[in-house]
Image (spheres, rainbow, N blue to C red):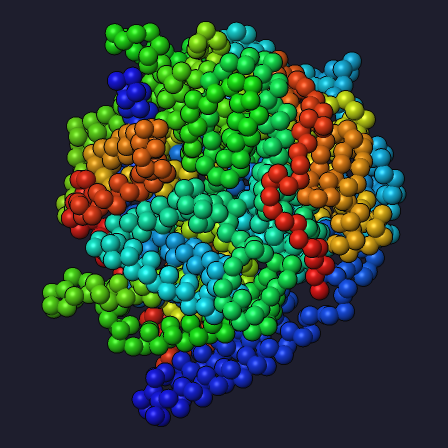
């Protein structure tokens, strides 16, 4: 019995201590805010959450460059970049709503948990009123869900999966980047013209949600005009050596290989497929062809010469000659000495679009700011006339079909634009991809 | 036949990569009793020897051409490799052969790195627990990785094979099959041959030289050998250097197959540990055999015919086989009793 | 005095520990860690590390697959939220049970081998779990995206008790207290204290002695006719349950469960936390967990801007130089600092951070303290073979 007493006393002391502690946090929770992290001083803080370690670190670094440039332009520094070509003139280079734009950064590590931890730090500690960035759909969806719960706006970075604005869409989340559905719709007619209607296709697909969704959309848009699927094989993410998946392609009777791989997987699988002589092959009396549905120019450097002549799609490329793109490439190039990637472009646009919406709504409150973005039509940000659809928070704009350049002028000049697929052709009904936006969450 | 033979080649190829890393790893285990989590990093460093060599050979003279401008308005830079201006066509040839040429760089560099690592760090951990060895070598691996990342970035850097072996060859024709039945990339054949030579040399070295004999004796019973008045420590330094060289040149030759990036060592680390353990701790033959076995099984498990019956089997086959082997044969394929069991 | 907590020092230790946990938000504020999410991570990974330490620190069995139990705990908790109730209690109970059962299964097989063979077996099981969860098992795990709550989930118990969340996506709450933010931290913190208490109990019990005996010489134990495997297996299952609890708590404070939680790097992380802090010590693993999570969240957040501000007292060129040098170690270079830290700690403090602490304490106390040597006996590394 005595034992128990000592023990119980210890526990009670502990409980008392916890009790004291429980009353402490009242100091930290200020209930006065109308919405999460309402900026009260002379500045507003944005959270840039990008991969800084692991496979997508370089892409993340490029995103960060774009963000820093955007902040500079918002605060009136530099040459103003795309603010000058942007159709909305609400932003004047005087910060946003008169507040100086400041930012915090964090490392997503391209891991959902790490990305959420980093975003939470920005929200809870640094007072960020908006989170943006990322280089994969898993992370985008994870952080989007978090921002919905916390009551801040999430402006997605590079994320191409349908789910981000489909099955897993959230009211507080917005995406400027395109998705696999649009890639399929844009790529299919170009492939038909280039390779003909009678083709047998072999899919090698990264074994996760983005890969499946990409494979599905290519099939969906090529099968109606007669392409057949010879086989669709799932490959583990990060396999490195894909030889065991490539050899069966050789004698499968297929004459097109679609590599539903992104980033590092694509950098490995494409050159390996070329080494296996696929591109020199004749099957069914036709030249064997390889397609990479989603190109990342930045990562494609790692594939070397293998990308020459390969078709794919991209959200934006720095070789575009419209005023917006030219202005962006100019200010980015002058600041960093390299041209921006599509990841950098989408991140820059998202920041500008957010700031502009805040300016037009007159507040950073997610519900009102979001309303200002819904069905907002704009131009001058490099993709032609664009529409932020209200029913799923997805941007609709022209999609670029590109091809690996045969004679690149520099290490950055890897892609040539084959066709600009008009927006009307890639549009789909909002309810096609399922999911529920739900109501906005303003948080605290 | 036309289905299986290419997969066997794939398996051998993969196995060769596993075996070369595992060989060094098990040498270090067997002789020094050290769990070296930095071994993957050594493989990565080897690969970056090739990157460095290509960068050195490809050093460019930059001239500004004021008549042309970039998209952001600065004068266009015209880049010509120095080596082309100095040596002309031979220079370009050297550049093209940069991967095999970099072996000349990799061997001394890896030897120095290996010996420095052993003298400077690993030596002090012979009598520490395995957990501490893991912590220190893992820390070292991260540091090495980050240093490489700060120089070369995180993206993979392509290292093309020389033109003459960059395409594929019709292996099937050599075996009397119809043309086009078995087409295989030539560089992979080169890599396979190269690995065979390296593995054979390591075995010959340990088998037929006095030095090798002492090392083998040391692997069997370190204390007794030490009592015989042989300076086993010095020998072990060389063994570590040797293991580093084997990992390094494996990394060099693998670059045309897998564009190197700073993280590639970690990707191979876990697999090579599995290979070593499945082969049996301290057994060189076991490591090589397990490397090839797991490589071939992985290739077969990836075949569509197999995957339709067992979806996802290609993702777990290595681990599944490892578990089965360790349960059936307690010390792996050829392990000895009492090594690394406590 | 025969008490359950045998020594007064243990009681003091527990009280101080509880006081630190309770004052966490204030205590960690100056170093920039006093915000809910990081504090929650400290507590959760503290629990994970305490559990891992019961296996590794006491028995010496080095498991490289503990992340699998963390992941299973998370998946179980999220599924409980989806199917039964948003109340964390059923979720946590089921997470602990799932972690225990899964570890019983894996432990039962893996414990047939020892040393590195055991490590590789656990690694293999965990990697298989991860690879399958990422791809083939997507209907259960939602693959890469991670398992999330949906507004349309059934939540049978909540419905039975008449709770309706309306059109909003529900968050876990303990009878009305929302468990994100500080309440979530105190919830985790309370469980951390309980776990710490359990850990002290195990360390001081005959069972703990038996586990230590397994570590020092299993063969000798076996010769005495005693079958040690049930003891080691029990330790394995206990640590699996701790991992399941930690995984469940991750889901409670943030209802999303991703496959990456089961990857070998996550298993490696918990090993590093334990060794870094000092394996076999009571406090060490918790401290190790805190240090690694702190680096991950705070060091990675420095960017050029912040650094330039930090060094703004330097003249311009020096300011940029200083920011560049510092930039190698923070921001995108935070891994470098972590790697270097691992090396420095293990080279100079073989017993982990705890040994460092003892060295400093002993420096002040010299030999007058009778407690000191005994404690450092805990932290002394076991002789290799």
Residue B67 location (% of width, % of height):
78, 13
| Residue C103 horizontal side relative to residue A146, left or right | left
Tell me which residue sits at (86%, 43%) in the image. A91
Tell me which residue sits at (76%, 44%) in the image. A374
| Residue A363 horizontal side relative to residue A262, left or right | right
- Which picture quadrant has residue B189? top left
Tell me which residue sits at (77%, 41%) in the image. A375
Residue A192 showing in the rendered view: yes
Quarter of the rendering occupied by the C terminus of chain A: bottom right
| Residue A9 horizontal side relative to residue B18, left or right | right
Residue B283 location (% of width, % of height):
20, 39
The relative height of residue C79 versus residue B214 in the rendered view (above or below) is below
| Residue C73 horizontal side relative to residue B287, left or right | right
Quarter of the rendering occupied by the N terminus of chain A: bottom left
The relative height of residue C239 versus residue B303 in the rendered view (above or below) is below
The relative height of residue C179 versus residue C267 in the rendered view (above or below) is below
Residue C348 showing in the rendered view: no
Tell me which residue sits at (33%, 55%) in the image. C63
Residue B243 location (% of width, % of height):
31, 35
- Which picture quadrant has residue A73? top right
């Amino acid at each position: 019995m005595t034992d128990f007493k000592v023990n119980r006393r210890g526990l009670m002391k502990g409980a008392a201590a916890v009790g004291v502690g429980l009353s402490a946090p009242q100091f930290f929770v200020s209930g006065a805010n109308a919405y999460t992290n309402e900026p009260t001083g002379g500045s507003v803080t944005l959270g840039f959450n990008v991969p800084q370690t692991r496979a997508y670190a370089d892409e993340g670094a490029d995103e960060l460059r774009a963000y820093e440039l955007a902040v500079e332009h918002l605060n009136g520094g530099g040459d103003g970049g795309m603010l000058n070509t942007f159709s909305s003139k609400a932003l004047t280079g005087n910060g946003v709503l008169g507040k100086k734009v400041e930012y915090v950064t964090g490392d997503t590590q391209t891991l959902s948990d790490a990305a959420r931890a980093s975003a939470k730090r920005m929200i809870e500690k640094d007072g960020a009123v908006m989170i943006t960035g990322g280089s994969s759909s898993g992370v985008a969806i994870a952080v989007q869900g978090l921002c919905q719960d916390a009551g801040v706006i999430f402006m997605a970075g590079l994320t191409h999966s349908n789910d981000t604005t489909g099955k897993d869409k959230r009211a507080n989340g917005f995406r400027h980047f395109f998705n696999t559905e649009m890639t399929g719709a844009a790529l299919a007619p170009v492939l038909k013209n280039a390779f003909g209607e009678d083709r047998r296709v072999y899919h090698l697909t990264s074994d996760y949600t983005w890969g499946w969704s990409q494979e599905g959309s290519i099939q969906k848009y090529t099968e109606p005009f007669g392409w057949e699927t010879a086989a669709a094989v799932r490959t583990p993410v990060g396999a490195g050596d894909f030889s065991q998946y490539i050899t069966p392609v050789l004698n499968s009777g297929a004459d097109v290989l679609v590599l539903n791989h992104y980033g590092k997987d694509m950098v490995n699988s494409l050159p390996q497929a070329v080494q296996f002589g696929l591109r020199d092959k004749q099957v069914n009396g036709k030249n064997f062809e390889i397609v990479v549905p989603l190109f990342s120019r930045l990562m494609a450097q790692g594939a070397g010469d293998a990308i020459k002549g390969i078709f794919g799609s991209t959200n934006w490329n720095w070789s575009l000659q419209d005023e917006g793109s030219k202005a962006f490439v100019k200010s980015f190039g002058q600041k960093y000495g390299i041209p921006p990637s599509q990841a950098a472009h989408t991140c820059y646009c998202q920041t500008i679009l957010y700031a502009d919406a805040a300016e037009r709504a007159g507040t950073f409150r997610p519900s009102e700011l979001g309303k200002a973005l819904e069905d907002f039509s704009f131009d001058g940000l490099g993709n032609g006339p664009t529409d932020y659809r209200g029913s799923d928070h997805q941007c609709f704009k022209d999609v670029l079909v590109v091809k690996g350049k045969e004679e690149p002028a520099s290490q950055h000049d890897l892609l040539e634009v084959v066709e600009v697929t008009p927006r009307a052709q890639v549009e789909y009904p909002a309810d096609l991809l399922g999911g529920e936006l739900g109501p906005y969450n303003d948080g605290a | 036949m036309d289905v299986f033979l290419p997969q066997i080649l794939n398996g051998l190829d993969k196995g060769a990569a596993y075996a070369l890393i595992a060989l060094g790893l098990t040498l270090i285990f067997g002789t020094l009793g050290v769990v070296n989590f930095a071994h993957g990093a050594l493989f990565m460093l080897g690969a970056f020897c090739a990157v460095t060599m290509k960068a050195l050979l490809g050093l460019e003279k930059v001239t500004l051409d004021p008549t042309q401008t970039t998209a952001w308005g600065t004068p266009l830079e015209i880049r010509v490799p120095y080596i082309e201006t100095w040596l002309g066509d031979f220079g370009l040839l050297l550049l093209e052969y940069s991967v095999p040429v970099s072996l000349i760089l990799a061997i001394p560099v890896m030897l120095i790195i290996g010996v420095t690592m052993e003298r400077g760090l690993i030596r002090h951990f012979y009598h520490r627990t395995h957990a501490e060895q893991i912590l220190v070598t893992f820390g070292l691996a991260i540091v090495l990785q980050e240093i490489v990342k700060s120089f070369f970035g995180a993206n993979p850097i392509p290292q093309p094979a020389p033109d003459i072996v960059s395409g594929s060859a019709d292996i099937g024709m050599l075996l009397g099959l119809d043309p086009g039945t078995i087409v295989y990339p030539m560089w992979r054949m080169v890599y396979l041959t190269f690995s065979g030579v390296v593995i054979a040399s390591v075995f010959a070295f340990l088998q037929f030289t006095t030095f090798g004999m002492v090392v083998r004796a040391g692997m069997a019973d370190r204390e007794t050998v030490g009592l015989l008045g042989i300076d086993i420590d010095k020998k072990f330094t060389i063994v570590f250097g040797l293991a580093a060289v084997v990992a390094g040149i494996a990394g060099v030759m693998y670059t045309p197959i897998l564009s190197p990036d700073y993280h590639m060592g970690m990707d191979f680390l876990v697999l090579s540990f599995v290979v070593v353990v499945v082969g049996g701790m301290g057994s060189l033959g076991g490591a090589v055999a397990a490397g090839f076995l797991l490589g071939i099984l992985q290739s077969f498990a990836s075949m569509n015919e197999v995957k339709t019956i067992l979806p996802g089997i290609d993702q777990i086959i290595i681990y599944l086989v490892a578990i089965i082997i360790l349960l059936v044969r307690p010390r792996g394929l050829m392990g000895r009793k009492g090594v690394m069991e406590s | 005095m025969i008490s359950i907590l045998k020594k007064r020092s243990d009681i003091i230790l527990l009280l101080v520990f509880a006081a630190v946990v309770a004052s966490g938000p204030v205590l960690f504020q100056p170093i920039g860690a006093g915000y809910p999410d990081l504090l929650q991570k400290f507590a959760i990974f503290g629990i994970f590390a305490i559990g891992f330490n019961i296996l590794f620190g006491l028995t010496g069995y080095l498991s490289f697959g503990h992340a699998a139990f963390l992941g299973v705990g998370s998946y179980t908790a999220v599924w409980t939220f989806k199917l039964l109730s948003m109340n964390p209690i059923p979720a946590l109970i089921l997470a602990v049970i799932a972690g225990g059962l899964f570890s019983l299964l894996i432990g039962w097989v893996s414990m047939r081998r020892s040393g590195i063979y055991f490590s590789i077996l656990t690694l293999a099981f965990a990697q298989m779990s991860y690879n399958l969860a990422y791809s083939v098992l997507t209907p259960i795990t939602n693959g890469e995206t991670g398992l999330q709550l949906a507004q349309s989930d059934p939540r049978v118990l909540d419905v039975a008790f008449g709770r309706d969340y309306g059109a909003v996506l529900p968050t876990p709450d303990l009878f009305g207290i929302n468990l994100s933010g500080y309440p979530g931290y105190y919830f985790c913190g309370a469980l951390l204290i309980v776990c710490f208490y359990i850990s002290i109990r195990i360390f001081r019990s005959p069972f703990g002695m038996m586990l230590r005996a397994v570590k020092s010489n299993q063969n000798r134990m076996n010769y005495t006719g005693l079958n040690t495997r049930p003891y080691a297996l029990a330790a394995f299952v206990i640590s699996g349950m701790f991992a399941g609890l930690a995984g469940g708590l991750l889901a409670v404070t943030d209802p999303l469960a991703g496959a990456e939680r089961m990857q070998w790097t996550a298993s490696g992380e918990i090993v590093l936390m334990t060794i870094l802090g000092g394996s076999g010590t009571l406090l060490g693993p918790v401290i190790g967990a805190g240090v690694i999570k702190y680096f991950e969240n705070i060091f990675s957040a420095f960017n050029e801007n912040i650094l330039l501000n930090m060094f703004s007292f330097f003249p311009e060129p020096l300011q940029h130089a200083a920011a560049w040098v510092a930039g190698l170690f923070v921001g995108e270079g935070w891994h470098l600092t972590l790697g270097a830290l691992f090396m420095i700690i293990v080279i100079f403090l073989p017993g982990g951070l705890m040994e460092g602490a003892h060295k400093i304490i002993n420096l002040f106390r010299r030999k007058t303290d009778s407690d000191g040597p005994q404690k450092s006996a805990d932290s002394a590394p076991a002789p290799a073979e």
